[in-house]
Amino acid sequence: MRSWKEETLALTEKLIHHPSVNGTVGERDIAYHLIDFFRELPYFQENPNQLYLWKTEGDDRERYNVAALVKSPEPKEETVILMGHMDTVGVEDYGKWKRLAFSPEELLKQWKKTTLTGQVKEDLATGKWLVGRGSVDMKSGVAVNMALLRHFAEHPEELDGNLLFLATCDEEDNSHGILSAVRELNHLATESDLRYVGAINTDYTSPQYKGDPSRYVYLGTVGKLLPAFFIVGEETHAGQAFEGFDPNLIAADLTYLIDYNPDFCDEMYGEVTMPPVSLKQTDLKQKYDVQTPFAAFSYYNFFVHSRSPKDVLQELKETASQALHNAIQMHQERYQRFCALSGSPYLPYPWTSEVMTYDELYEACVEKYGGEFKESMRFFGMNLLNDEALDLRQYCCRMVEEVWDWWGEKGPSIILFFASVYMPRVVLSEKEEQDQRLIQAVHKAVKDVQPQCSHPIQIRNFFPYISDMSFVAICDDEDGIEALTRNMPAWGLKHQMDVDAIRQLDVPVVNIGPYGIDAHKQWERVEIPYSMQVVPELIYQVVRGLLASWDDQ
């Protein structure tokens, strides 16, 4: 096995020392640092036109993606992409140590002066872990790719094809980096006669349960949707509570039906997604008074392996109908009990209720108001972009609220829509030649490297976290995509996604990444032996094996 650890560790430490928190100037500047690293290599001094600094498109910040291409000495079109992201989450979770979050050595010294407990204490006592923000997510992964590209830049004769390094920005927020990079990758393929035969992402991996001894390699990735609900009630004074309808009651039942519910887990190839979980539940009252809220808003993280956006919409529309029915029934039952308790006459209110998707509501308004409505909504959506305080989820909610105002109906109702970035699932299949060659290369590399690794290396089908892997291929059909685009109010406005460009790229992707614990948390750390030695060797063998398989055809 080649020696990778010292170089990869040194590169990781240097990258951690360059803060690149999402949305800060550091996220921009780390791209310059990577470009400078490659410019110092003799290969790129001889081939400077194979270094690329790509500015993101449609972004409200100045930031860049970095790409570097090493070509085979003999002209080849087959190309493997090494990909990872440069940005990190913030450091507020470090508390009193946040000024040291980008200084691994000093941070470790300070931690050792405190009373550490449990797994953190055990890990740090071994001397085999590197700490600091981005250590596992994912400066170590980028460092692995840098070390590999430097090796092949010094030994291009080992390549039976080409190797493209790609480091993206904005992975931790709205994915401007990879969404911009997709178009650049397609342009580069045309310009340089490249054919992408596989992509290797180096995002972090973690134990799947407490005490899990395994390390993991993933073929493809989980998809993620953010279904959201605009929940309408009917306002009333708190002194006449039963004359209105509190939308929070509906929202509560909706969360009860969805949150942690294994019925919504998606199984494929024997692997099961995590169940959905609530990420936000709130009413839309802006100030205090004794009037009940008009509307509430909730959304849920929803992982998928096989389900399309259309499938999820249909399933959750049924759930919303059940929640609305339950809430109305509870309202009536409690009103009846109150009347019996207080001696008041029971005069049930005949609530009319509706559950609609955003598309159904929008089209109903088009039928009712015609072009006037469409033009007004177009203007409203464009004008709403000027409110920089609104994030993507809030923007979608405001759009739905505006359409509901046009609709003009009363009574408890639910509007179902999608409120955030669409993260497509990527499924590799043995039936597809490109997929099959990549799968075989991964299996062979794992088999060959396993004897040098003290932990079992398992191959799974779905990377379990959201990542840039989702944007290099799409498995959903046109009906599934249409269900998404017609039910995401921000589509084409605050959220831009070139589905056609992703379909054009269409490259099978795997994740072979560093191993660590507590990503996005105070005790973030990466295991050095596996991450800095085994991972680069695995990727080295996959790259060589995959390109050789195409060379042998």
Image (tube, rainbow, N blue to C red):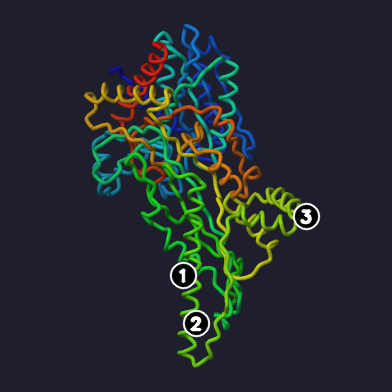
- First of labels 2, 1 by sequence position: 1
Q: CA distance from mark 2 to mark 1?
A: 14 Å
State the SS at label 2.
helix
* Disc 3 target residue: 372
Q: Is residue 90 or residue 271 the one in the foreground? A: 271
Q: Are marks 2 and 1 in contact (CB under 8 Å)?
A: no
* Horizontal arrangement in the rendering, residue 22 relative to residue 127 (left or right): right
Image coordinates of residue 439 in percent, x first then y, are 36, 26
Q: CA distance from mark 3 to mark 2?
A: 42 Å
Q: Residue at x 52, y 47 (%)?
A: 310
**Residue 281 drawn at (x, y percent):** 50, 61
Question: Which residue does the image show at 36% across and 21% down from the upper left?
Answer: 542
The residue that disc 2 covers is 335
Q: Residue furthest right?
A: 372
Q: Residues within 10 Å of mark 2 (few under 14, many from 20)?
A: some
For residue 251, above or below residue 375: below
Question: Label 1 amino acid?
Answer: Asn
Task: Relative to 342, say whether 474 is above or below.
Answer: above
- Secondary structure at numbered mark 3: helix
As drawn, the label of residue 326 is 1
Q: Amino acid at mark 3?
A: Glu
